[in-house]
Image (spheres, rainbow, N blue to C red):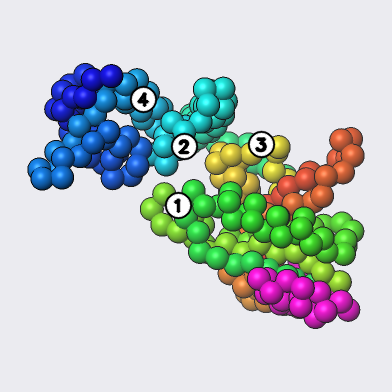
């Protein structure tokens, strides 16, 4: 194999000098030799194939960390990872396209069909919780972390919605800022203190009894469905304010937090949705 200068390597690989220096720093594409006296980088012509692969992988908007991992994989594993990445990218694109269509319709004066809103009573509950400020891209991993804890050390089961784990959005993560999220799992009140000792990473707290207004979320819901659910709940709330004019809400969404509740998977024929979006409330008598 032949050794060539960084300038020649850049020309033949279609990568800029700046990009090559960055890839060297990140360990993605390391020169075959660096001159000790001048610091000048030299590459082997055998590295051109990897360099061209980097160009194409970056076109797929893969982060450098993923590119580095792919270059170290055998071809079959690399192919699978690329297929998985592209499937996720297409799903994300479909979600954004659906959101764009929804916004165009809404701003054009078309009113969306609202979801059916229902209410339910929730008892006082002891909760084991994991609370953290996370960025948008960290939400999924944070949820997986909480679920992994529950799978590793299962908790006693409480039947129904009152026993389902849920996620509270104290503030919602966006592309412009992180949000405060809290994952919660109800536990039997009589056993709460003893159970908490086995989960030092979780916080034990008590949530007061309250009413919840909620809407069922469809399977595979995205930003559009989430937005419609929030609008449906807001519209219901405005109706209640008119109905109870002059009365004070004893509990507001800010007190207990907007939440998604995840019911354990049941029969396929069950009429109850596995996931719903809920807002706690209570009107003082």
Q: Which residue has dot 1 on it?
A: 174
Q: Can you give x and y, in whole percent of width and height, for residue 87 in the image?
A: 56, 27
Task: Establish if 129 lies above or below 272.
Answer: below
Quarter of the rendering occupied by the N terminus: top left
Query: Label 4 to label 1, Cα distance in Å?
Result: 35 Å
Would residue 210 be counted in the magenta stretch?
Answer: yes
Q: Which of 5 and 76 is in front in this view?
A: 5
| Few, some or many residues within 10 Å of mark 2 (<14, 14–19, 20+) | few
Please give the name of the residue rendered at 38% of the width and 53% of the height, measured from the top-left corner.
176
Query: Label 3 to label 4, Cα distance in Å?
Result: 37 Å
Q: Quadrant of residue 193?
A: bottom right
Q: Nearer the viewer, mark 1 or mark 2?
A: 2
Q: Can you give x and y, in whole percent of width and height, for residue 178 in the image?
A: 45, 59
SS at circle 2: helix
Q: Which of marks 2 and 3 is in front?
A: 2
User: Is residue 122 visible to us here?
Assistant: no
Q: Seen in the image, is 159 located left or right of residue 3? A: right
Q: Which of 189 and 74 is in front in this view?
A: 74
Q: Which residue has dot 2 on it?
A: 69
Query: Label 2 to label 3, Cα distance in Å?
Result: 29 Å
Pointers 4 and 1 in contact (CB under 8 A)? Answer: no
Q: Nearer the viewer, mark 3 or mark 4?
A: 4
Q: Which residue has dot 4 on it?
A: 50
| For marks 3 and 4 on the same chain, the one whose residue lies earlier in the sequence | 4
Q: Which residue has dot 3 on it?
A: 220
Q: Can you give x and y, in whole percent of width and height, for residue 144 in the image?
A: 65, 52
Please give the name of the residue rendered at 30% of the width and 37% of the height, measured from the top-left corner.
30
Q: Quadrant of residue 84?
A: top right
Q: Nearer the viewer, residue 81 or 146?
A: 81
Query: Label 1 to label 3, Cα distance in Å?
Result: 20 Å
SS at circle 1: loop
């Amino acid at each position: 194999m032949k050794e060539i200068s960084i300038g020649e390597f850049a020309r033949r690989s279609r990568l800029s000098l700046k990009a090559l220096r960055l890839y060297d720093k990140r360990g993605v594409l390391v020169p075959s030799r660096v001159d000790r006296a001048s610091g000048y980088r030299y590459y082997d012509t055998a590295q051109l194939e990897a360099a061209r692969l980097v160009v194409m992988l970056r076109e797929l908007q893969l982060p450098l960390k993923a590119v580095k991992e792919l270059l170290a994989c055998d071809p079959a594993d690399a192919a699978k990872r690329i297929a998985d990445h592209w499937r996720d990218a297409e799903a994300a694109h479909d979600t954004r396209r659906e959101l764009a269509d929804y916004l165009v319709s809404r701003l054009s004066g078309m009113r969306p069909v609202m979801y059916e809103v229902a209410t339910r009573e929730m008892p006082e509950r002891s909760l084991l919780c994991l609370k953290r400020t996370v960025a948008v891209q960290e939400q999924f991993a944070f949820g997986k972390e909480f679920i992994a804890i529950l799978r590793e050390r299962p908790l006693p089961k409480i039947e129904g919605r009152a026993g389902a784990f849920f996620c509270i959005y104290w503030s919602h993560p966006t592309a412009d800022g992180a949000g405060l999220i809290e994952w919660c799992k109800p536990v039997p009140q009589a056993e709460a203190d003893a159970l908490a000792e086995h989960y030092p990473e979780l916080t034990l707290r008590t949530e007061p009894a309250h009413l919840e207004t909620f809407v069922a979320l469809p399977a595979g819901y995205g930003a559009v469905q989430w937005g419609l659910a929030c609008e449906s709940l807001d519209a219901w709330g405005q109706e209640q304010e008119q109905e109870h004019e002059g009365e004070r809400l004893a509990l507001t969404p800010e007190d207990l937090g907007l939440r998604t509740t995840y019911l354990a998977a049941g029969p396929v024929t069950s009429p109850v949705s596995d996931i719903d979006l809920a807002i706690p409330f209570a009107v003082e008598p």
